[in-house]
Image (cartoon, helix red, strand yellow):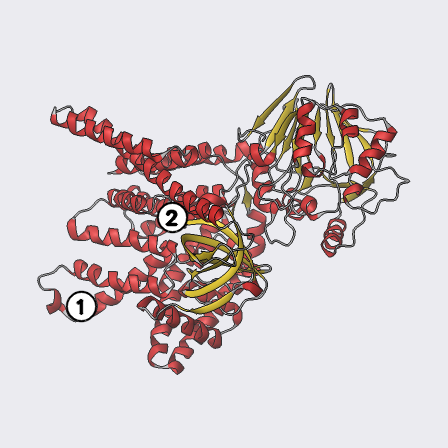
Amino acid sequence: MILLTLCLLSGEALELALFHRPSVFLALFFASLACTILFSRRKRKSIARCFLFFSFFVFGAFLSTKKLEILQDQASSLLHHHVRARPLCEGFLRDDPAPRAQGVSLEVMLVRCQPARDKPFEKVSAYVRLFVKGETEELWQGDALRFEATFQKPQDFFNPAAFSYRFHLASRDISLSGFAEGSSLVRLYQREQSFFQRMVALRHQFLRRINSSMSPDAASIVNALLLGSRGDIDDEHQKLFSLLGIAHILSISGLHVVSIVVILSWILSLILNRCAFVYLSIPRRYMIALLSLPMLWVYVLFVGAPISAIRAACMITFFLISTFFFRRHDSLVTLAGTVLVMCILWPLALMDISFQLSIVSVLGIILTSRFLPKKKWMQVTGSTVGAYLFSAPLILLTFHELTPLGLITNIIVIPLFGFVLMPLFLAASLLSIFSHTYGCIVWKYSGFLLEELLIVFQALLPAAEETTFFAAPTLFQLALCYLLLIVALMNFKRAYRGSLFIMFVLLCSFVWPMYRPQITKRLEVTFFDVGHGDAVLLRFPDGTSWMIDAGGFPSSSFDTGKRILAPALWQLGVRRLETIILSHAHFDHYGGFSSLRQLFHPEFFFLSSATSSQEPEWKVFFQEMKEHQLEVRFLDANTPRWKKGEVEFTVSYPHADLRIDDINDQSLVLFLRYRDVSFLFTGDIETFSEKQIVQQADLDSPTVLKVAHHGSKTSSTEEFLNMISPRYAVISVGKHHRFRLPHEKVLHRFEKRGVALYRTDRQGAITMSTDGKEISITTLRDLPTK
């Protein structure tokens, strides 16, 4: 069972990276299954077993590709048949709204759309992640909505350690992203009063009771813990729980479901002890399992049936069902069987981080309880430690931060949560049904206990911040880590010292790649994929690193520095940025610098002497740079050339005596030379600036040109390109942009000159490495430039 599950998971995971046609894998599946039957009849069991494993592998590949194909067909059909800029659509709200910086995020099940004003509505079937800007009326799960929106396929950023937003949405059956204004969204009616809708209404009733019975901070935490409603938790408390390593308790997932089952089992056990006649012919564990399951699924419906809760409930259900059929069941085999069934039912569940964490946490608990001594205190503590150790590598891979203090906080918080807080919350909920007064009393005292706990958490926050470890491990490091963890646990009883040595090797395997010296005697320039923006990493032969621009998305809470650039830098081995350079004062160039300043502690901040902007965001950003004691230097064409080792820098623009009003034309133009290889970084300069540079005629021909203004037709003029004649050019540009850059005229200008062109929207992150004579270029993708 374990090997079959591993084969299925391997097929699903591998094909998510390759994505071939599902018909190929379906044919391979039937062929391998036929071979399995053929060789088993001929008593060739070893060969039959190999074909059986292979059949599960290709079956997993078929399931994942088929699901992705269905989602892509849904997206393509909607985008193709509803070509109107903002089609009018109707659908049902699948989950409660999630607050965002300037609006809300909704998951909507589309049922019909109107392709044009003069045409009737057409039926559609797709799930959409809808971002609504502005205020909206109060919305509930299950509400019918009508809205005008623009749609696009989810966008991934192809960089080292990149998070796949597309696969994340696909794991929730979402095929499109949509954007709407709050003024266009209308709540039509609420779906018919089914049992599920009554559960939703009851949940909102409890939300109001909790909010009226305790402080806002405590109420927001209780609403998340008990009801799965995280909308009222402020950023401060989100950060607090995250840094302490206990953010997982704020989401309804495996831990909550297990706690509910344990509490229900305990209550049912007390009741059945007084009603022994009920189960005279039925073992008590069967009765408890039989009665717990319906109550468990009622709770899942009560919290809104989020996908993470459904999958966790399915895992518990399969575990409990196994007790009916196997008197002595192997927990590891049961876990494997559960994962096997769930990955067949939800082929893309493997891409859901909550599902991944549930699997590895349960695996850690099973292995620690199996290989540790049978002393009760060691089993209880070891289970928590095992769950933390097995989830830690995956947390680092996904969220890129971890604190060792989380091991201690989880040992304390998980039992406190499972055996104190949750019973109190459930008792208050039950009491409030029969007596609002008594329910409020219990809510009040449980809220007081939670407030005291939050005070303790706040006291631990400085220690957590000091010990937080940032990293972006590779998949190879992740596999090595789990292998060493399993080996260490298997040898814990027999060789205690050997297990500690393996743990030390495990720690080194994580730490060494992040902190190893980066002295390569080569200059490396990496152009990151940050959408419509610029972000360039300079890694010098002496091992130091600089950053030119840091991307950013105006009018969005998405943090380019923290979400895209920081993980990429950590995986590349960059722990510190010596200098950050800003080309000009547009948000799509400086938006990520605030997070990079906090995480990589630069000393110097270089920018154009012509920089001038009245935008409030720029004023706040620049004041932040000055307040945190960065040495700010304004550069222009009069700045003397300077060297960093053998790398020489020259500022070619702006000219000191030139008054420039356009922010793009205020861009810093920087020429970098390393022996015989040179780079020209042009920011967003346009025709005016290029004419000024051409008139000076003192710019050498660069080996590599960073194309100005993302390939706009107002840049990269014929005269400018004739003067510099680059061999390579890189365009930093995003997909689905309203200006549809790069412009065809600009592409034609480079093509007719024979310039080798690279684009971040098609090749992803582009790394150019040189020893000063030869230059090698690697990209994360191999799509053609056009």
In the picture as drawn, the residue positioned furthest to the top comes out as: 773
Alpha-carbon distance for marks 2 and 1?
35 Å
The residue under the point 56% across, 47% down is: 467
- Residue under label 2, please give it: 355
The residue under the point 34% across, 58% down is: 257
Could you tell me if residue 259 is visible in this image? yes
Going by the image, does 538 lie left or right of 63?
right
- Residue under label 1, please give it: 273
Instruction: Give amino acid for label 1.
Output: Asn
> What is the number of the mark on residue 211?
none
Whichever of labels 2 and 1 marks the residue nearer the N terminus, that label is 1
Instruction: Give amino acid for label 2.
Output: Phe
In the picture as drawn, the residue positioned furthest to the right comes out as: 657
Q: Residues within 10 Å of mark 1 (few under 14, many from 20)?
A: few
What kind of element bears circle 1? helix
Instruction: Residue 96: give x, y in percent of width and height.
Output: 45, 63
